[in-house]
Image (cartoon, rainbow, N blue to C red):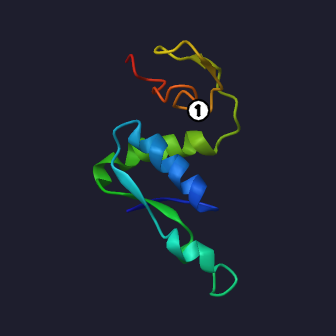
Amino acid sequence: MKIFSAANPPQAHIVCELLRSHNIECEVRGEGIFGLQGEVPFGDSSEPHVWLFDVSQAPAAQALVKQFEQPHSLPEWQCSECGEINEGQFALCWQCGTSEFADE
């Protein structure tokens, strides 16, 4: 099931990794055709997207995607592993890669 259409492959990978950090199985699809932009018709059907494997995880995935798409108004958080302060829009510590929710 397509859960998120991205503007570019990096954005699709960011959303995919966000979902994976919450144990939601997914993968990026359609990124290969992105390089042909301008050579072939490009639209919703040819954009890179995140594909959800388990449809029962759709509500949780949709909530995370909605949160990702919101303006960055989330509070900063401190990594439980290395103590680094991270901006609220990031679910993984930029310093060590630990999930914001690692201690839950």
Q: Read off the residue under disc 1.
A: 90
Specify the quadrant of the image occupied by residue 22: top left
Which amino acid, mark 1? Phe
Q: Is residue 47 above or below residue 81?
A: below
Tell me which residue sits at (63%, 45%) in the image.
69
Number of marks? 1
Q: Quadrant of the C terminus?
A: top left
> Residue 101 in the image: x percent, y percent?
43, 23
- The residue tagged with tag 1: helix, strand or loop? loop
Side (left or right) of 71 relative to 97: right
Side (left or right) of 22 relative to 95: left
> Residue 86 in the image: x percent, y percent?
62, 23
Using the image as rendered, state which of residue 80 and residue 89 is in the foreground: 80
Q: Is residue 28 above or below residue 40?
A: above
Q: Is residue 60 above or below residue 90?
A: below
**Residue 50 appearing in the image:** yes
**Residue 63 appearing in the image:** no
Tell me which residue sits at (33%, 49%) in the image.
25
Q: Quadrant of the N terminus?
A: bottom left
Q: Is residue 30 above or below residue 83?
A: below
Tell me which residue sits at (62%, 33%) in the image.
89
Tell me which residue sits at (47%, 14%) in the image.
80
Using the image as rendered, state which of residue 48 and residue 36 is in the foreground: 36
> Residue 65 in the image: x percent, y percent?
53, 46
> Residue 15 in the image: x percent, y percent?
52, 48
